[in-house]
Amino acid sequence: MDTFNVRPGSKTYLDPLNFKYGFRKSGDFSITESEILSTYGHTLLALEMGEVTPETDAEIHFVQAVTGKLEADSKLEKTWIKYVRLSRTKRTFFTLYSSASKSKLLDNDAEEYDSNDLEAEV
């Protein structure tokens, strides 16, 4: 993993609300991206929220990239922006067969047949 001129977090960053099985197993992030989020996540979140003042040039650039004043250059900035997009926006899922239509079909089938309709063939 690349080393960045950003302070690592004091502990591993997790987001069980949005990524229940972790960043690695989510399928959304590469191994490198998941390591970046786990290592630097607490610091990046604090920088984004303004709870911590940026100390290095990399941290200043990160804050400007996250606020949209500059374009994201480093892998760290691009990974955090990707994480924000995936975790803070609603995802749309499309299915070919939903459980709502399945339950409707089962209800209709139950209404059409009664126990007299079911006869065993011998």
Image: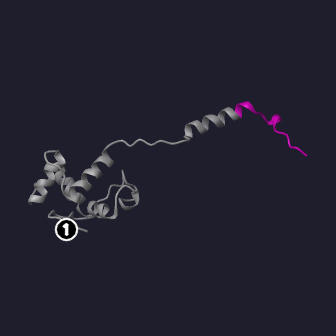
Q: Residue at x 60, y 39 (%)?
A: 102
Report if residue 96 lies within the magenta region: no
Question: Furthest-right residue in view?
Answer: 122
Identify which residue, 46 or 71, lies in the foreground. 71
Disc 1 crowd rating (10 Å Cα; few below 14, some 14-19, many 20+) is few
Q: Residue at x 22, y 67 (%)?
A: 2
- In the displayed structure, 96 sits above or below 7; it is above
Residue 104 in sight: yes
* Circle 1 residue: 3
- In the displayed structure, 120 sits above or below 72; it is above
Q: Position of residue 27 (x, y in %)?
A: 40, 57
Identify which residue, 103 or 83, lies in the foreground. 83
Q: How many marks?
A: 1
Q: Position of residue 48 (x, y in %)?
A: 18, 50
Colour scheme: one colour
Q: Residue at x 25, y 50 (%)?
A: 81
Report if residue 119 lies within the magenta region: yes
Could you tell whether 26 is left or right of 83 in the image? right
Residue 50 in sight: no
Instruction: Give the quadrant of the N terminus.
Output: bottom left
Q: Position of residue 116 (x, y in %)?
A: 83, 34
Task: Give the image quarter of residue 57.
Answer: bottom left
Identify which residue, 5 or 116, lies in the foreground. 5
- In the displayed structure, 64 sits above or below 37; it is above
Could you tell whether 89 is left or right of 64 in the image? right
Q: Position of residue 74 (x, y in %)?
A: 19, 58
Task: Give the image quarter of residue 111.
Answer: top right
Identify which residue, 112 or 51, lies in the foreground. 112
Q: Which residues, given as a range, are shown in magenta?
A: 110-122
Q: Secondary structure at mark 1?
A: loop
The kind of residue on which mark 1 rests is Thr
Could you tell whether 28 is left or right of 102 in the image? left
